[in-house]
Image (spheres, rainbow, N blue to C red):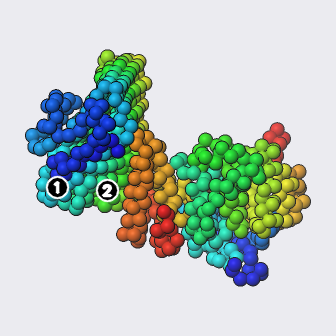
Amino acid sequence: MTGSEENRVLRIEGLTASVGGIDILHGIDLEVRPGEVHALMGPNGSGKSTLAHVLMGRSGYEVTGGSVTLDGVDLLSLPTWERARAGLFLALQHPTEVPGVSLESVVAEAARADGRSTDGTYEDLVAEAARIGFDERFLARALNVDLSGGEKKRNETLMLGSLRRRYAVLDEIDSGLDVDALAAVARRIQEATEEDGLGVLAITHFGRFLEVLEPDRVHVLARGRIQVVGGPELAERLEAEGYTGVLAEAGASVGLPTGVTHPDGHEAGFGEDPFADPLDR
Amino acid sequence: MAGVVVIRNGWVVENTLEARLAEAGMTIGAVADLDDGSDHLGSVIDIPVDLFGHLNRAYGPEPVAIVVPDGVQVDAPVVVVVLTDADASAVFPRVIVRCGAGATLTVVELHTSTDVASLVVPVLEATVDRDGHFRHALVQEMGPRIWQLAHQAFKVGQSGTVEAFTAGLGGDYARTRIDCRLVGRGAEGRLAAAYFGEGDQTLDFRTFQEHAAPDTTSELLFKGALDGSSHSIYSGLIRVRPEAVRTRAHQTNRNIKLSPDAWAETVPNLEIETDDVVCSHASTVSPVDEDQRFYLESRGVPTRVAEQLLLEGFFQDVADAAPVPGVAEILKDALIERLDRRTGSSPSEPGSGSTGIDSATGDAGSAVAVGDAQ
């Protein structure tokens, strides 16, 4: 749509950002091309969710430098909804409950804003629900209201499938899902990369998710920078060895500097490793 | 429609009733024209509660009574239009309803005006007899220079039910007092209201849920959105009399501020004179939820449309509580009209974070969304 194949890329260059006056991202460089799957891993508090929110333009996340372009379009100059229209989808780690607003109306209004037909929106949602084994009766509920954590994540996947954006940032879309749902969600995203050429940036802690999703590249984020980049084998190594070992080998430390408060309010932990055996510390 | 009454500047100018219902003994008309008309005056409000009530009683030229005999079921609504088009006047319409034992009745009132600067003091008094079921919906959509001081009073007998809904949209200053007196065992009152203030409107609601008999139930849900520098005041009292054991009474008032200059006050009160009751009240005033708006925007929904969806969602439960089908549609249309007006008239109002509006509202939003959001 915008220019040649060469131009078709979600490109993040030298991106720095702060939250509440605290610098969180210290220069992120990352490129996602259509059909590619990039996994973004890293210890808690490393800036993964901040990156996701910055890309979608959430208020409170201030970009202090760098650029983000989507197929040549400068994303950072656009309001959130136009970023979506430009081709970006963000699956939230904690999908918001919206009482009184239906899934169908949101998807229909998004289509209307895109200049697409809203005919068959519901039928499309039903078909998408079937693809991930999501009960059709959930479609009638207000958005995410009275859904379990796992159901909310399937709801996100449903919208990802239905909205058909060109790039998707998935902020732990795998958390809260049971084994079967995890496989169904990962499979649906994998299919979108093949059928629609969806480019994926998947923030995840789970190797199991990546077994189905098969990332082209794995990036490890720590202290607001991408410290290590590798192929799928890197995810396996992280699963086996934890962040501390892998990052130390790459010459990087793990956590935020001590004394820094995480934007969520808690004291930033040093080297919390979600894969480490809690009895082995 | 079962019947139509048009009250213009306080005078009855039209008055029809389906023949079938007239044969069944139902009557509609000016009190003076009814055989037992004077019995109905003051049937709920024996002593006016304030000066304006007295003025209505003194100067109301032609009170209207809608009387449904015992056991008669009126399925279609009676429509009452209260029209004010006299400038610089004071208008005192009064509607009196009697829903007989075991009878059912639905009344839809539309209070409207031309753009005149007048005082309107409408009074409704409705009696619901044993096992009667009265549904009432009132849409107040008067002009921007009207001052309104309204009083609705319901008295519900044993096992009777009243469901009342008010949409408060128009007027410069619009005050509505609603009394729901549950006087018979097992009586039930469901009160709902939706209001939307814009410009420098003041919308004022005062409610009384009075439980004067055992096993009575009242539910109240009032929700409002305030834009511009409009004000709303909600004050409500649940009063449980000593004899009203096993009362269940709930009162909820929620407000959304769409502008930093808007102001909403909410004052819930309980006065309970017996044990063995279940009562609750809740009230909130907050801006449009930032997270919800971001969530919808992240799906590609333009800011203005996202706010419209959120407001429709906010009003959804109260619209569902309206006892007359179609009121939800009226409310939705009024909402869209006001949101259009708002983005059209003040595109550059630099909202702070708390307004729920940010810079995204301005230029690009209108090109895509305005006009085709049906």
Tell whether B349 sits left or right of A11: left
Work out whether residue A25 or residue A33 is closer to the camera in this orientation and state it: A33
Of the residues shown, which amino acid type is indicated by label 1? Ser
List x then y, in percent, for residue B162. 35, 32
Work out whether residue A188 or residue B78 is closer to the camera in this orientation and state it: B78
> Looking at the image, can residue B111 be seen?
yes
Q: Quadrant of residue B266?
A: top left
**Residue drawn where x is 31% and y is 56% of the image:** B230
Letter of the chain that mark 2 sits on in the rendering:
B
Report whether mark 1 lies on the same chain as mark 2.
Answer: yes
Q: Secondary structure at mark 1?
A: loop
Identify the residue under disc 2. B230
**Position of the N terminus of chain B by quadrant:** top left
N-terminal of the two: label 1 or label 2?
Answer: 1
Work out whether residue B303 or residue B164 is closer to the camera in this orientation and state it: B164
List x then y, in percent, for residue B71. 34, 26
Of the residues shown, which amino acid type is indicated by label 2? Ser
Identify the residue under disc 1. B118
List x then y, in percent, for residue A3. 71, 83
Tell whether A9 sits left or right of B175: right
List x then y, in percent, for residue A234. 87, 60
Q: Secondary structure at mark 2?
A: loop
> CB atoms at circles 1 and 2 under 8 Å apart?
no
**Residue drawn where x is 27% and y is 41% of the image:** B17
Q: Is residue B331 above or below residue A249?
A: above
- Residue B372, numbered circle: none
